[in-house]
Structure formats: C-alpha cells, structure tokens
Amino acid sequence: MPQPPDITVVVLDTATRRGLVDSAYNEHREQCKIPARFFGVPALRDVSQAEFDAKAETIGPVVFRRARHVIRENI
C-alpha cells in the first residue's frame, strides 16, 4: 500500500546492541520453566487461561506473574 505523500519514514541504526547476558532475561526464562513443569507442559504457551486460573494460586507470586504474562500474551 502506498504511503500518503505527507508521511516520512526514517530508519536508523543506532549501533546499540542488546546484551541478554547482562539483563534479567535468562532469570525470567528459568522462572517460566517452573510453572511449565508444574502444569506438565513443555512451555507455558501450552497452558490455557482456564488451566492457569484453576491452579495459579498454588505457585509463588513471582512465578505467578511470569506465568500469567506468558499465558495472557498467547490468548
């Protein structure tokens, strides 16, 4: 689809690299493995919202938040 004539698109390479080693990404991934094992699935994307709601209060608060985020993201 053609862009309207009054639109300008700018693409920038800031040369900023994202370092997952220095972030909490790996910790969050590990925290997501706990509820996946709890629900007996290979990944949280395999847990339905109904399954999560039925058992969610039995997992800790941090793990609950991580799991809820992933499950809601995949609805």
Image: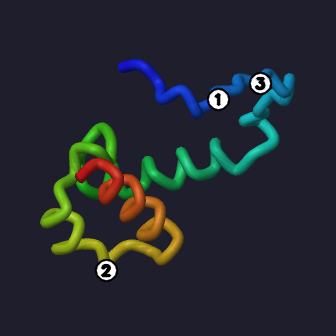
Picture layout, residue 62 above or below residue 75? below
Mark seen at residue 8: 1
Q: Quadrant of residue 20?
A: top right
Residue 41 screen position, x and y as percent: 24, 44
34 vs 4, nearest the viewer: 4
> Do callouts 1 and 2 mark residues in contact (Cβ within 8 Å)?
no
Picture layout, residue 45 above or below residue 20? below
Dot 3, how many residues are within 10 Å of its Cα: few (below 14), some (14-19), or many (20+)? few
Amino acid residing under circle 3: Leu
Q: CA distance from mark 2 to mark 3?
A: 45 Å
- What residue would you read off at disc 2? 57
Q: CA distance from mark 1 to mark 2?
A: 49 Å
Residue under the image location 43 percent in, 54 percent down: 34
Residue 31 screen position, x and y as percent: 52, 55
Mark 1 or 2, nearer chain start: 1
Residue under the image location 84 percent in, 29 percent down: 16
Q: Quadrant of residue 56?
A: bottom left
Amino acid residing under circle 2: Glu
Dot 2, how many residues are within 10 Å of its Cα: few (below 14), some (14-19), or many (20+)? few
> Do callouts 2 and 3 mark residues in contact (Cβ within 8 Å)?
no
Q: Quadrant of residue 64?
A: bottom left
At mark 2, the secondary structure is helix
75 vs 11, nearest the viewer: 11
Number of on-image labels? 3
Q: Please, which residue is most extreme toward the bottom here?
A: 57
- What residue would you read off at disc 3? 12
Residue under the image location 81 percent in, 41 percent down: 22
Q: Determine whether, in the image, residue 22 is placed left or right of residue 62.
A: right
Picture layout, residue 66 above or below residue 14? below
Q: Determine whether, in the image, residue 25 is placed left or right of residue 19.
A: left
